[in-house]
Each structure stands twice: as structure tokens, then as C-alpha cells.
Image (spheres, rainbow, N blue to C red):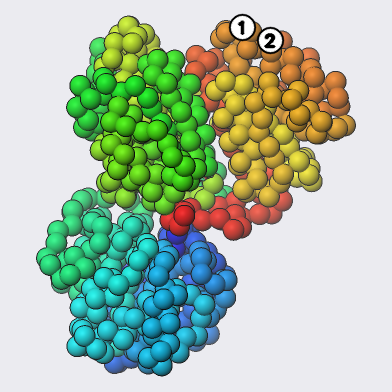
Amino acid sequence: MCGIVGYVGSVRERSDAGDLDGEYCALDVVIEGLRRLEYRGYDSAGVAVVADGTVQSRKKAGKLANLIAELEEHPLPSTLTGIGHTRWATHGGPTDANAHPHLADEGRLAVIHNGIIENYAELKQELLAKGVKFASETDTEVAAALIGDLYRGAADGDITKAMQLAAQRLEGAFTLLAVHAEQPGVVVAARRNSPLVVGLGDGENFLGSDVSGFIDHTRRAVELGQDQIVTITPDSFAITDFYGRPAQGKEFEVSWDAASAEKGGFPSFMEKEIHDQPAAVHDTLLGRSDPRGRLILDELRIDPAELKQVNKIIVLACGTAAYAGMVAKYAIENWCRIPTEVELAHEFRYRDPIVDKNTLVVSISQSGETMDTLMAVRYAREQGAKTVSICNTNGSTIPRESDAVLYTHAGPEIAVASTKAFLAQITAAYLLGLYLAQLRGNIFSGQIKDVLADLNKIPEKIQTVLDTTGPLRELARSMKDEKSVLFLGRNVGYPVALEGALKLKEIAYLHAEGFAAGELKHGPIALIDAGQPVFVVVPSPRGRDSLHSKVVSNIQEVRARGARTLVIAEEGDEAVREYAEHVVYVPETPPLLMPLLTTVPLQIFAAELAAAKGFDVDQPRNLAKSVTVE
Ligand code: F6R
């Protein structure tokens, strides 16, 4: 969950010299990388550089800005070897002492870490018995002490060897980076179950939790495998396994540039990403069908004969991605007639699910690193299931460990609250459903062609929603002092209601709940009091007519009890107008595809309301973008 950057260079003169000390140095690169990775965690930040036979570090609780202020007050020397960390706390609270780097070997070794070391208590006892002293409550300091101990002992002053030996003893999930005072121009890293990418420069090399850590400098990258060690110098990188045996990474070219990770003139990344949605859906559809309307999912490398045998689908995901999974269930069951379950990955893993070789497990994850989802996918594979990953992050762990992947092409999502990834996940799930239906002959090819044509019109329709948000934003601002907002929906509108509530909780810190509209009378209706705001996602009147009229009845029920009804409906649906205090109309679209439009006003509502409350929309409290712990 933390962000990690490492750098080794050999030249000081460059046109993009940073401004920390007027000269291009490791610190500039590291701080810039941390700025881009801060979405991964922002409880504290720290850096270490190797200078004149010493390791020097600064670290500070709170956001990166606090560390930068500290560096201005207590500057570090300008050098060409450095590491940096932005933290999301697991062991020990977000204090200066618990911030990374952690030092060992009498201050000559600095270590940063992402993940959790599960056997740290046992290792700590061992090290305490040897007289090692600890200054923090973290598992990372134990790893640092272990590397330091091995460096002086069995590794005989070789930092790569010390890292290999330490990694053999560590259990859990970790990306560890280390620098040593006696080895300037070297950064060594270990990776198990936690992300790490190498960036290849000219006379300089980089390490990052993901490519945004070094995207300002290079687009050439190497993806590391599980249980690997990498040592970078200005002119080389060498990969081994934990036992020192040479290993290979996979080189790739990053397809997006630094500009696409910037805010593009919007007040927040979240606003930018909401506005990126027409492109996210468009790009996810791109190149995945031929002009005759046949799906071509070349990347789905599972034998079609095996896909035809599938008799059950389980969709695994967490949070927003799980709501995309709920939409997927409606679509897949409708088109493919395959029983489809959706389960939170962390619940699936720890019961005794019924999974076999005829089960297709579809995981959905923006980051591709969510530990709960990864563990569930691994478990499903062990049970013999076929696994497909719907993922937004190239080279991440979940797609690598799945039998096949369908990438969403939403581009980097920086804001912690997911928006464009959600619409792209739903789009990819529709493609998967249509592909399975095509393969199994469940629906006529003409029907598939029609759905694809409807999907191709969605980006333009999202744009229409985005272009007409004035009154909705005004409504959101006027509601900034509300204490609670409820959301109702039916069928595919139900996950949309859940997502609307989640967005409001996570960025506006406002009590919000989503319900299946039919469930209201079974309890939640007791919550309705005079003035209670209730959003209702109304299905198309052109769909199953009973659904529309049932939801209109639900609006009347809450309104009769004093609720303020805020309605999202399809253009031309005049029936809702007389029961709604505020209506947001979205363009006509087939009922099953509606979530791609009805979600958008709810995202905007949450972003506007949170901004009106003065909150940091991109980095809500207590959250991190990538949840790499269970
Ligand atoms: C909410 C949100 C989270 C993620 C969840 C899964 O806005 O972003 O609920 O959807 O943590 O993350 P990924 O998709 O990276 O597996």
C-alpha cells in the first residue's frame, strides 16, 4: 500500500534539474516519484541518500508536504543514490519514528518497505537476543535489522547477498529497498507478493511501486516476478531469485506519459478522472470487435473448448470493483445463462467455496494488487478453477497470476476513490459476457452486434451527462451540511445505488447507504424522516415495465414519509417528475447498459459535496489507493 522509489544516477547536469537545491540529484528524482505515488499512502514520508560514505535520512509523519518542509529546514547533500517512501500505516501508528526509512548497521543501512512481514515478532526476539535495539514499532525495522545483521555476517559486506539471505527468512508480503553507506551507486530490492518495477534510463536506473514513480524520466520498464531480487547501478540491473540464481524480468514500454497522470486543468484528480470516462469506455471497447460485430478477445487465452464447459461463474472483487461485479452478474446471466455469483474476495477466501475445473473465476481489480483479491484468485486456482482477471494495471500481480486477462484501458487512476476504472470494469465485463455468449451460441450474432453498437454510443452519452451537471452541482453544494443520504435502486440500478453511497462515504465522510429499492419495506423505510434526502436510480420505462412502475411506487412511499426525493431517470421519463424534488436525466440507453450513465451523476454529486465541505477529494482520510494488505 505504500509508495516506493529508488534511484541511482551518474550525471549531475540535466535540463530537468530539480529545484530542491538547484542541482539535479537523487533527491529530486525521489521526491518527484513520491509525489506521483502519494496516492498509495500518505500517513508519512521519508527519504535516504548515500553521501560521502554515510547514509543520511529525513522522515516525517503526515503528507509529503511535511517532509519537503523538513528537507528545506534540514537539507540533505546532493548525491546520486537515494530511496524514498510514502507510507500507509500497518504496524505502528503514523508517527515520525514509525515512518520509513528505518536504519540499521549503526546507521549505515537504510531500508524502506511495502507490505507486512508476518514473522517479524519471532525475528525481533532473535535480534533482541543479539543485542539489537529498536526505535520503532514497525515490522520494517526488524527487516532492516535482519539485513544489517546479515550484511555484517554471512553476506560478508555484500548488500545484494544480505538482501537475498534476509528475503529467504521473511514471511508475508514485501517490497524492500535498501542502500548502504559502503556501497554508493547501488540500490537493492526484494519483492514477494508486493509490487515493484524497474525503470531503465541512460546512465541512471530507477525502482518504483509502479511506473508513475519514474515516468518523468523513462518509459522503459522491467516487470519483476515473484520472489526476486534486483540490484540497480547507474549502468546495470541484475535480477536473481532469493537464492542468488540469475532470473529474468519482463521488459515493456509504458504506454502512457507523465502528462496523463496530471490533473489536466481540473481541480482534483477525481474530477479529471470523472471527465476521462468517455475515453475510458471508448478505449476499453477499442479493437475488441470486428466490423461484422464479432467479439475478438485475443488476450483471453483460455481454450474455447474449456470456456464452453464452464457451468458456474464466480466474480471476485472488493469495494467499487465488487459493485462492477454485481452489474456483470446481471449481464452475464442475461446473455450467457450461466449461473453467476459475486462475492467479496475476502469473504470467499475464508469459507469453503465450491469451485472446480468447470468454474470460471473472474476477478475485477483496478490496481491488480489488492491482496484480498489476489489471495482469493490464488485459492481458486489451487481448487482447479479457470481464472480471468479484469484489470487496469499492466504488469500487476493479479493478471500475472491469472490464466487470462482482459485489461481495461482507463489509464492511470490517481484519485483514491475509483471512478473511471469502475465504468471501464463494467464495460470489460459486458465484453466478457458477450464473448462467452458468442462462444456458447447463447444469443444470435445480430443481437451481439446490436449491443456492441449500443456500447459504442455510450462515450458520447456520458459526455452529454458531463456537459449538463450545473444544477446537480448546485444541489450538492446546498447539501453540504446533511447528516445522511440514502440511495435506492433495483436490478442493475442496485449496484449503482451502492456505489453512489460508497463515493459519498469515502470522500465526504457522510453517512450514506444504498438499498435494493424492494428491500425498503423490510426495514430501512423506518429511517425515513422529514427532509431525509433519498437518491433513487430509476430503471428505463422501456425495460421490464413492472420494474419501472415498482420503483416509481418506491419513490412515492418515501416521499409520503417526508423524504426529499432526488431522482436519476432516463430522458423522456415524465412519470417521475411529479414525485421528485430534483431530477437528473440521462440519455436513453438499453436497460442493462444504464449503469454506465446513471453512475456518473452520483460521482459528480459526491465530488462536489466533498469539495464544498473543504475535504481533499483525492486523498480521503484513512484510505489508500492500493490495498496490498489482507
Ligand atoms: C472505492 C475504491 C475501492 C476499490 C477497492 C478495490 O472508490 O476505490 O473500494 O474499488 O479497494 O481496489 P482494486 O480495484 O484496485 O482491486
Residue 60 seen anywhere in this rendered image of the structure: no
| Element type where label 1 sits in the image | helix
Where residue 77 appears, x then y in whole percent? 37, 86
Which residue carries the number 2 mark? 549
Q: Quick check: 33 left or right of 183?
A: right
- Asked whether residue 486 is in view, the answer is yes
Q: Nearer the viewer, residue 237 or 259?
A: 237
- Callouts 1 and 2 close, C-beta under 8 Å: yes
Determine whether the beta carbon of the residue marked 2 sits less than 8 angstroms from the nearest atom of ligand 1: no
Q: In which quadrant of the rendered view does residue 408 lie?
A: top left
Q: Residues within 10 Å of mark 1 (few under 14, many from 20)?
A: few
Q: Position of residue 547 (x, y in %)?
A: 63, 12
Determine the residue located farthest toward the left in the rendered image.
246
> 198 or 463, which is in the foreground?
198
Residue 235 image offset from top left, x and y in percent: 15, 72
What amino acid is at disc 1? Asp
Q: Which mark is residue 175?
A: none
Query: Compared with residue 419, is residue 218 higher up or lower down, i.e. above or below?
Result: below
Q: How far apart in space, not on screen, are marks 1 and 2 (Cα)?
A: 6 Å
Q: Image point 46% across, 28% down: which residue?
A: 341
Answer above or below: position of 319 versus 297: below
Does 197 sit left or right of 462 as displayed? Answer: left
At 53% from the left and 25% from the top, the residue drawn is: 595
Q: Position of residue 307 (x, y in %)?
A: 26, 24
Measuring 80% from the left and 19% from the top, which residue is drawn there? Answer: 557
Considering depth in this image, is 584 or 398 the residue closer to the camera?
398
Instruction: Name the quadrant containing residue 386.
Output: top left
Kind of residue at badge 2: Ser
Horizontal relation, residue 116 to residue 530: left or right: left
Residue carrying label 1: 545
Q: Residue at x 46, y 25 (%)?
A: 329
